[in-house]
Image (cartoon, helix red, strand yellow):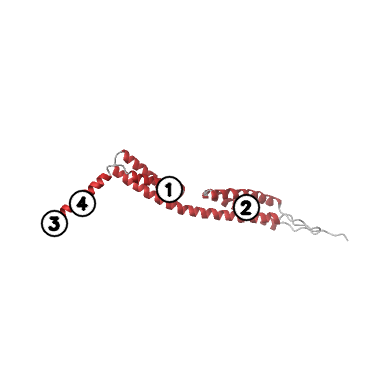
């Protein structure tokens, strides 16, 4: 029974020291934690979080701003809590941005592939519908309006493809997708229109020979 008072005093002393350390920690601005939060925000921004994880990134910036405001009001405990929250949210935003950027890259590259295939088909149609007519034979003429429309779109599509590729190289995946996907649809629609127009062309009349 004689040990209990000593044990109680030891526990009390330990609790007092813990309180003292906590008080000391909250007696000054949490500069280290605030710097860590700012570093995490900078890293998240570099990872594209402002675009691909906008909500979480904005929350991180808000938490850090509140941390600075709490320091101004000398509420260092609140400043610490906000700094820790800002750091955690920024790290989450960076992870989300990496995931979303990978998805955006895949969509953009898929759209570029689709446009490349559409343009290849378009060039093939233009070549097929402009054959050299063998001597003594009459070629079926291509429908000029549909052919001209396809030629215009293929030319524009070639330029669009180069621009979209430059966006992908600069990691502007949304911009690349916005260019490539609609142009691919336009080129394929023009190809279909040309093919449909050719199916309704009248067959060339046979040349009558005199007796």
| Horizontal relation, residue 142 to residue 77: left or right | right
Q: Which mark is residue 187?
A: 2
Q: Quadrant of the N terminus?
A: bottom left
| Horizontal relation, residue 172 to residue 197: left or right | left
User: Would you say the residues marked 1 and 4 are in contact, meaning their CB atoms lie under 8 Å apart?
Assistant: no
The residue at which mark 4 appears reads as: 14
Q: What x and y, as percent, mark residue 115?
A: 59, 54
Q: Is residue 158 above or below residue 75?
A: below
Q: What x and y, as percent, mark residue 159?
A: 62, 48
Q: What x and y, as percent, mark residue 30?
A: 32, 44
User: Would you say the residues marked 1 and 2 are in contact, meaning their CB atoms lie under 8 Å apart?
Assistant: no
Q: Nearer the viewer, mark 3 or mark 2?
A: 3
The residue at which mark 1 appears reads as: 43
Q: Nearer the viewer, mark 1 or mark 2?
A: 1
**Helix, strand or loop status at disc 3:** helix
Q: What x and y, as percent, mark residue 124?
A: 67, 56
**Helix, strand or loop status at disc 2:** helix
Estimate how packed mark 1 is, as few (under 14), some (14 to 19) or many (20 or more) residues with alpha carbons within 10 Å. some
């Amino acid at each position: 029974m004689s040990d209990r008072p000593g044990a109680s005093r030891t526990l009390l002393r330990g609790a007092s020291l813990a309180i003292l350390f906590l008080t000391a920690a909250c007696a000054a601005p949490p500069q280290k934690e605030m710097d860590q939060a700012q570093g995490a925000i900078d890293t998240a921004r570099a990872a594209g979080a402002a675009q691909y994880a906008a909500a979480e990134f904005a929350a991180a910036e808000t938490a850090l701003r509140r941390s600075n405001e709490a320091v101004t009001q000398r509420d260092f405990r609140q400043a610490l809590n906000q700094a820790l929250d800002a750091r955690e949210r920024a790290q989450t935003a960076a992870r989300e941005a990496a995931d979303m950027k990978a998805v955006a890259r895949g969509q953009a590259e898929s759209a570029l592939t689709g446009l490349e295939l559409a343009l290849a088909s378009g060039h093939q149609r233009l070549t097929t519908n402009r054959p050299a007519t063998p001597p003594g034979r009459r070629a079926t003429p291509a429908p000029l309006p549909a052919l001209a429309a396809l030629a215009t779109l293929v030319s524009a599509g070639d330029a669009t493809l180069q621009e979209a590729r430059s966006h992908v190289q600069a990691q502007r995946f949304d911009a690349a997708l916005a260019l490539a996907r609609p142009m691919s649809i336009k080129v394929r629609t023009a190809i279909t229109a040309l093919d449909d127009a050719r199916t309704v062309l009248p067959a060339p009349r046979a040349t009558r020979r005199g007796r």
